Every structure is written in C-alpha cells, then in structure tokens.
Amino acid sequence: MGFPSTPALTVDCVVFDPKGRVLLIRRGHEPFKGEYALPGGFVDVGETVEDGCRRELREETGLSVGDLYLVGMYSDPARDPRGHTASAAFLAQLIAPADPVAGDDAAAAEWIENWRGEQLAFDHAQILGDAEKFLAAISQD
C-alpha cells in the first residue's frame, strides 16, 4: 500500500532581534515575488522539521539559531497558491546578533522594525502575530 496524497510539508522561521525587529526576506521567485516573507521553505525527505527550519534560515539569511519553539501548525489549503501546504512555524533564538545576507531563493534579507506596515506573503502576518503572543507568554514565566 502506497502513501496517501497529502499536503506538502514546509517550515517558517520567526526571528526577533534584541531591538524587537523581525527578520524577513524578500521573495526572489513567485508566488509573491518581491514581497516580504518569513525565512522558510519545504522540508527535505529524511529531515526533521527542526532541521529543515534551521537549514532554510541559514540558506536564505546566513544566520544560525539555537533553540526553536513551535508557534503552531498552519494548514489552510489556500495558504499557498501553488497547492496545499502545511507549515510548522517556529520562533527561533539567535545565537549571536548578526547581519543577514540573502542567499538561495531570497532576493534580500533584512531586519524590519514595523512589519505590520508591510505586505507579507502567504499567511505570514498571522504567524508573526501568533509568535509575538507566544513570546510574550513565555517571557512572563
């Protein structure tokens, strides 16, 4: 018996710097070419979602992170115009402050202070809002 047809598995990575800015990329390819997005992408076969998150962040921004905290799963069938994806979104802790350098399929990578004023790709505004709430909750502990 073969595997069933299922949504593609992706990851999204939320990284805040000590100044409260969020790390965003400019997408180099469609869909949403030129728009801001969270670093992320498809999980490779044989890779955990955590390893995929760290790899995608490193490939797209040149940055490495330590601990990852699951913000949530995002699986609306309409979240990606290419087809149904399910994304594990993580909040990541920077190992050390650093300047991002765009790579892989990112046209740019930068720290953004007011992300709410930007048009974000996919459902990344929702993910960022949820990550902020999550960060506020764990900061109170």
Image (spheres, grey):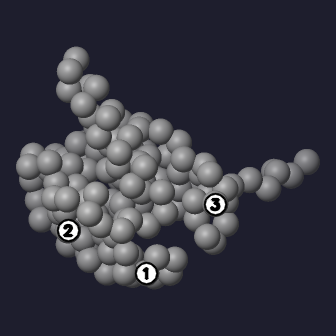
> Does 124 sit above or below residue 88?
below
Q: Are marks 1 and 3 in contact (CB under 8 Å)?
A: no
Earlier along the polypeptide chain: callout 2 or callout 3?
Answer: 3
Q: Position of residue 125 (x, y in %)?
A: 39, 55
Q: Residue at x 19, y 59 (%)?
A: 114
- Determine the image quadrant of residue 111: bottom left
Residue marked by disc 1 = 33
Q: Are marks 2 and 1 in contact (CB under 8 Å)?
A: no
Q: Count of labels shown?
A: 3
Mark-to-mark CA distance, 2 and 1:
16 Å
Q: Residue at x 26, y 63 (%)?
A: 117
Which residue is at the front of the view, 35 or 110? 35
Residue marked by disc 3 = 78
**Is disc 2 placed on a helix, strand or loop?**
strand
Q: Is residue 101 visible?
A: yes
Q: Position of residue 85 (x, y in %)?
A: 62, 57
Q: Residues within 10 Å of mark 1 (few under 14, many from 20)?
A: some
Residue marked by disc 2 = 110
Q: Residues within 10 Å of mark 3 (few under 14, many from 20)?
A: few
> Does 103 sit above or below residue 73?
below
Single out the mark in the foreground, 2 or 3. Answer: 3
Q: Residue furthest front?
A: 117
Earlier along the polypeptide chain: callout 2 or callout 1?
Answer: 1
Mark-to-mark CA distance, 1 and 3:
18 Å
Callout 1, which amino acid? Lys
Q: Is residue 46 visible?
A: no
Q: Position of residue 99 (x, y in %)?
A: 12, 65
Callout 3, which amino acid? Ala
Callout 2, which amino acid? Glu
Q: Residue at x 43, y 49 (%)?
A: 126
